[in-house]
Amino acid sequence: ATAVLQTVPHCFATGSSRSHCTASTCPSPGKSSSRQSTEEQRRFATGMAWRSHGKDNDDLVDQLKSNRIISSSRVEAAMRAVDRGSYCPGSPYNDAPQTIGFQATISAPHMHAYALELLQEHMQPGMRVLDVGSGSGYLAACMAEMVGSSGKVVGIDHVKDLVDRSIVNINKRDKRYLDDGRLQVVVGDGRQGYPDSAPFDAIHVGAAADGVPQALIDQLKPGGRLVIPVGPEYGDQSLDQIDKMADGTTKRSSLMGVRYVPLTSLSHQLQR
């Protein structure tokens, strides 16, 4: 998912005071939910999620698994199948966000792993997934591995150059996802979802919305799950999980405090 660089006065994940921390998806200590397990709170509070640096892709996955960020065999297999080195221009196996241009980043590996874990039951073979703010294309490629050749993943980003670069990234080692049609990356305003391929079993959003866009709720299939950071720019935000029931009603859970860039217009993103 794409996340734009922002400045924060204190890095909660590492416990250090840094005036130019690029931890744009940093869990926040003040927003932990009772719904978040004690073990998850302990992991993030001690910074374990940010210690999963690897020497190569397999070692990175080993570290995420050792630190219990990855618990599902399907998530492990997907992150081993998609080499982060194809999507990240520098230090791809460090557990930290990395810049990808246009004031955007590829999120830290532990946040990608966490998102995949939250959504993995809704990314079974044959299911349909939307990744809003697809950026480098990495997370969408992992999702494509999980849904298989009979599934469909749409990555959407409003920066055309990022979409073009993500397709180049995917073609390096994961071209099969594009060739068999399971993965599509498009230019568009992700706040409006992608009606052409809706409804979706899973929707992931990589930037914080002031409120949950109704279009995303509408395009979520009954039984589906949306994971989205919610909150004002530079304010308190939470990573929320929204499940749509069979009757169309929704159940919303706040999972943890986070710090994401805003889900906003292209012009606002480029001016920040």
Image (cartoon, rainbow, N blue to C red):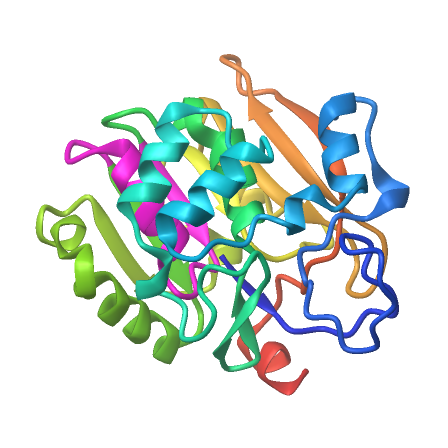
Q: In the figure, 24 relative to 216: above or below?
A: below
Q: Residue at x 73, y 54 (%)?
A: 210
What are the residue bounds of the magenta stretch? Answer: 128-151
Q: Residue at x 53, y 61 (%)?
A: 94
Q: Going by the image, does 35 lie left or right of 68?
A: right
Residue 141 within the segment the image draws in magenta: yes
Residue 196 shows up from this direction: no
**Quadrant of residue 266 in the image?**
bottom right
* Residue 129 image point, x, y percent: 36, 39
Q: Going by the image, does 172 lie left or right of 260?
A: left
Q: Going by the image, does 46 lie left or right of 139?
A: right
Front position in the image: 199 or 177: 177
Residue furthest front as drawn: 55
Q: Residue at x 68, y 63 (%)?
A: 24
Q: Residue at x 61, y 57 (%)?
A: 207
Q: In the figure, 3 relative to 111: above or below?
A: below
* Residue 255 image point, x, y percent: 72, 33
* Residue 127 image point, x, y percent: 29, 29
* Residue 9 image point, x, y percent: 88, 70
Q: In the figure, 38 relative to 26: above or below?
A: above
Residue furthest left as drawn: 179
Residue 52 within the segment the image draws in magenta: no
**Quadrant of residue 61 in the image?**
top left
Residue 129 shows up from this direction: yes
Front position in the image: 15 or 210: 15
The C terminus: image quadrant: bottom right
Residue furthest top as drawn: 246
